[in-house]
Image: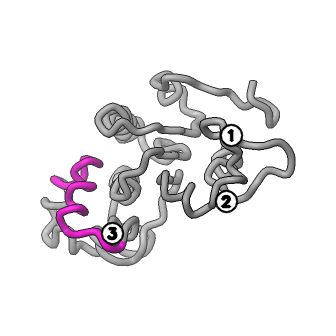
């Protein structure tokens, strides 16, 4: 599943066959042009040893503070950030260890959303979270999909996530079953 996401994101091209998006072979689309259309939230999001605000801004370095706060609000993170003594200037430490798994996931989601992507790819967005936090992130993704009119492609083993999808593909032995 992660390999399939990597192919769709064009981190590498297939050795055989092709990947079509809206009928276009992705190999015929300029990589930079394609990558500006989407954001990716990975299973174990990487956070830099800097502030929450800078971790969100990393998704779009020219973003204003207002845009950072808007992305954080969309990821249901703004109120939590404002409850911290240093707000958006809170240092998250190495790999975001000062934050819980759900908080790190939401920072990664805000970083993805600040780009206002047309497509959001998510690899196991609830995989490292407890059941309650995973449910909250899943609810958030569903709301965002409807409100922002995003196309979301989510790779998951979690039946709760798959059950909420509009369509599902199942991979078995390297093939779409």
Q: Which residue is pictured at 43% across the width and 45% down the height?
A: 118
Magenta segment main secondary structure: helix
The extreme right residue here reads: 16
Q: In terms of sequence position, does the residue under pointer 2 or pointer 3 come before the other?
A: 2
Q: Quadrant of residue 1?
A: top right
The numbered mark at residue 20 is 1
Q: Nearer the viewer, mark 1 or mark 2?
A: 1
Q: Position of residue 67 (x, y in %)?
A: 23, 61
Q: In terms of sequence position, does the residue under pointer 3 or pointer 1 come before the other?
A: 1
Q: Quadrant of residue 146?
A: top left
The numbered mark at residue 36 is none
- Residue indicated by mark 2: 11
Mark-to-mark CA distance, 3 and 1: 31 Å
Describe residue 122's horizontal placement relative to residue 170 as left or right: left
Other-residue count near label 2 (Cα within 10 Å), few / some / many at <14 / 14–19 / ≥20: few
> Would you say residue 163 sits in the magenta stretch?
no
The numbered mark at residue 57 is 3
> Would you say residue 62 sits in the magenta stretch?
yes
**Quadrant in which the C terminus is drawn:** top right
Front in this rendered view, residue 157 or 28: 28
């Amino acid at each position: 599943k992660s390999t399939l996401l990597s192919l769709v994101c064009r981190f590498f091209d297939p050795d055989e066959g092709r990947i079509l998006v809206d009928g276009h072979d992705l190999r015929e689309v300029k990589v930079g042009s394609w990558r500006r259309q989407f954001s990716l939230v990975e299973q174990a999001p990487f956070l830099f040893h800097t502030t929450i605000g800078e971790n969100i801004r990393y998704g779009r370095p020219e973003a204003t503070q207002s845009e950072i706060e808007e992305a954080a609000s969309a990821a249901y993170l703004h109120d939590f950030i404002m409850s911290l003594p240093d707000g958006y200037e809170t240092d998250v430490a190495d790999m975001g260890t000062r934050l819980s798994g759900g908080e790190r996931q939401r920072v990664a989601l805000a970083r993805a959303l600040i780009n206002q992507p047309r497509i959001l790819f998510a690899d196991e967005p609830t995989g490292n979270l407890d059941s309650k936090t995973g449910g909250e992130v899943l609810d958030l993704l569903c709301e965002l999909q409807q409100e922002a009119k995003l196309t979301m492609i989510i790779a998951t083993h979690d039946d709760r996530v798959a059950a909420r999808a509009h369509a599902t593909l199942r991979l078995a032995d390297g093939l779409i079953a």
